[in-house]
Amino acid sequence: MATPTPRQISLAVLLFAVAVLLSAPVHGAQDSPQQPASQQPKQPDQTTPDAGGPSGDTGVIAVPKKKDNTDEEPPAPPAPPEPKVTNPTNMPPVSLHVDVPEVTVDVGVILEKTGQFVPGLKPENFRVYEDGVEQKIDGFKRVEAPITALLLCEYAARGWVFRMDMLNSAWAFTQQLRPQDYVALMTFDMRTHIDVDFTQDKRQIQQAINELGMSVYMPAAFSETNVFDALYEAMDRLDRIEGRKYIVLIASGIDSMSKLTFDKILKRVKESQNITIYAISTGGLLREMTEGRGGMMASMRDMDYLQADNEMRTFAQTTGGMWFEPKFTGELPDMVRTINENIRAKYQLVYRPTNAKQDGTYRKLRVVLVDSEGQPLRMQDEKHKPLKYDIVARDGYRAKQEVE
């Protein structure tokens, strides 16, 4: 038998080692014997919880990662384009707006004895009631500004006494005018006549009054006095002027043959928003001397004058003005001074009505003065004597229609 060579021995050893490796079992975690569940050690939950703390009593606290600038979120998709709306052909642009109602009330506080304006009142001294419901005052200020006034004077063949009273009253009013005031003069009998248009030169008004005075004893053209129609025309002219306006109506108040009835002119007066009427009745002394005389015609005449006074008073009080019936010329300076003080010095209250409906209804207004405890305000002079005062304000206003 031949002896093996070293090379053959090395090859045999290598083959034997490979065979041993191939026949040996593979040991690992899957082939290890399983322990019972009760004997296996409890391992802590190593899952990473959400940011904010561990998931159980023990575990890992997760801290949110700081985002890299490179990991920014993708931009949001662009907004869809706005739809384009085009108006029909030949139709102008249309916009929609909602008017929030706001009411402005001018209030004058006048002492009865002297006619002086009462200064120094505060917002908490005023209470405004609309249809019996108290309103919250949002704005308050004292107003003293130039005036825009129309002198509406009766100049007819009713009698020279009436014409003379009118001229004296109109002249006394012009004496109170200031350089910044705008004033016009309109006279009426059966028709209206514009004697002087609006001007700041009171000399033009005084010159027109003097020209009327030259013929005061001459018979005028008509004895009829259409006060309702004249007042309507005057208000129609003033409606074209912005801001607060005043009518000083100086007349007997007797209406002869107007086209308008009293109800219609009163409705027009109530609809006015920025016009205040001050009324002066003429012929007071003549009426005082002839009132109560016997005879059917005298009784009818007295009734006509009483009705005229009531109508003049109604025009003034409805718009927040004042009514006067002077009997002597000496009363005129104090009377027109009261008118001027009440026109120029007012308290202006602004509120938003609780009834916001724009239904065109007439709303009744009432203004009262109270003290710090909510009781009716009492005034007294230096000698601690009580003073009576008048509150001059509109008695109501007409709400706008929604379609206006």
Image (cartoon, rainbow, N blue to C red):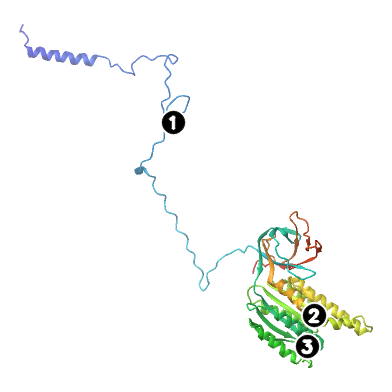
Read off the residue under disc 2: 330
Read off the residue under disc 3: 156
Amino acid bearing label 3 = Ala
Q: Residues within 10 Å of mark 1 (few under 14, many from 20)?
A: some
Q: In this figure, what is the number of numbered marks?
A: 3
User: What is the spatial separation of the Cα atoms under label 1 and label 2, in whole angstroms?
Assistant: 101 Å
Quadrant that contains the C terminus: bottom right
Residue 302 lies, in percent from the top left, at 88, 80
Residue 259 can be seen in this image = no
Quarter of the view holding residue 375: bottom right
Residue 331 lies, in percent from the top left, at 79, 78
Q: Please, which residue is most extreme toward the front here? A: 383
Residue 380 lies, in percent from the top left, at 79, 62
User: What is the spatial separation of the Cα atoms under label 2 and label 3, in whole angstroms?
Assistant: 24 Å
First of labels 1, 3 by sequence position: 1
Quarter of the view holding residue 339: bottom right
Q: Nearer the viewer, mark 1 or mark 3?
A: 3
Residue 114 badge: none
Amino acid bearing label 2 = Gly
Give the residue drawn at x 66%, y 86%: 204
Read off the residue under disc 1: 49
Q: Nearer the viewer, mark 1 or mark 2?
A: 2
